[in-house]
Amino acid sequence: GQQLNQSPQSMFIQEGEDVSMNCTSSSIFNTWLWYKQDPGEGPVLLIALYKAGELTSNGRLTAQFGITRKDSFLNISASIPSDVGIYFCAGQIGGGTSYGKLTFGQGTILTVHP
Amino acid sequence: DGGITQSPKYLFRKEGQNVTLSCEQNLNHDAMYWYRQDPGQGLRLIYYSQIVNDFQKGDIAEGYSVSREKKESFPLTVTSAQKNPTAFYLCASSILTANQPQHFGDGTRLSIL
């Protein structure tokens, strides 16, 4: 299946620092999604991007849909301890039997030191 | 409250046993999905269903089976043919219109005794 390359694999930061992570693909996607997963729980949707070049914010989170439609970025500003978790990007092509199917990145493990 | 309910939270299986994981949603979503998550890896799609009584294999369907007899329910059976079943299993659902995101349950952790 398709692969998404998500980086970095892990980050160790101090509280108050900004965080950036990204996903790249060899294929074009029509939708990019960013999820956060806390230990032992299911992923929760943070931001959905539907249009190339789109920049969307959700509180301290900002995500962008790359112009080429092959990448996406997530930034977290002024990190706090509750930002700890695993962040996943996911791309969706849509159409035909692939309708609704997502391809996930490997995840970025974020640790925030108080 | 509307949502996706997975049960049980923890499940233990003996070698050679089949086990069934439950997933129920009351969001009136058309599509449902099963994923497997292993440490350090992203989510891998096992099976998905876009409509009742129909489902398709995902990327790692071998050793698994599903049914979709009701819109609200999409149980996953881990068969004895799955040689490495220990993992965290996640169920998701979505509206089946253009580019609607998937929403996830809280998962079932399956371990082999």
Image (spheres, coloured by chain):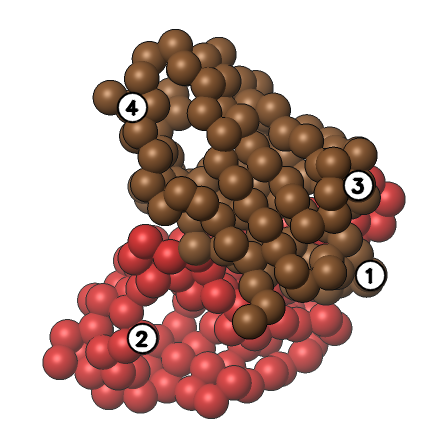
Chain colours: A red, B brown
Q: Inspect the image, locate mark 1, and give the three-letter code of the amino acid beneath it.
A: Thr
Q: Nearer the viewer, mark 2 or mark 1?
A: 1
Q: Mark 2 points at which residue?
A: A83
Rounded to the nearest angstrom, the CA distance separating label 2 from label 4 is 32 Å
Q: Where is residue A91 in the image (x, y as percent from the top left)?
A: 63, 56
Asked if badges 2 and 3 are on one and the same chain, I answer no
Please state if B100 lies on the left or on the right of A34 as rendered: right
Rounded to the nearest angstrom, the CA distance separating label 3 from label 1 is 16 Å
Q: Inspect the image, locate mark 2, and give the three-letter code of the amino acid beneath it.
A: Asp
Q: Which residue is drawn at 32% across and 53% down?
A: A40
Q: Residue at x 23, y 78 (%)?
A: A81
Q: Which chain carries label 2?
A: A
Q: Residue at x 86, y 44 (%)?
A: A96
Q: Inspect the image, locate mark 3, and give the three-letter code of the amino acid beneath it.
A: Val
Q: Nearer the viewer, mark 2 or mark 4?
A: 4
Q: Mark 4 lies on which chain?
A: B
Asked if badges 2 and 4 are on one and the same chain, I answer no
Q: Position of residue A64 (x, y in %)?
A: 59, 75
Counting residues from the start of the chain, the first of labels 4 and 1 encountered is 1
Q: Mark 1 points at which residue?
A: B97
Q: Mark 3 lies on which chain?
A: B
Q: Mark 3 points at which residue?
A: B52
How many neighbours does mark 3 have within 10 angstroms: few (below 14), some (14-19), or many (20 or more)?
A: some
Please state if A18 lies on the left or on the right of B79 as rendered: left
Q: Inspect the image, locate mark 4, and give the three-letter code of the amino acid beneath it.
A: Ile
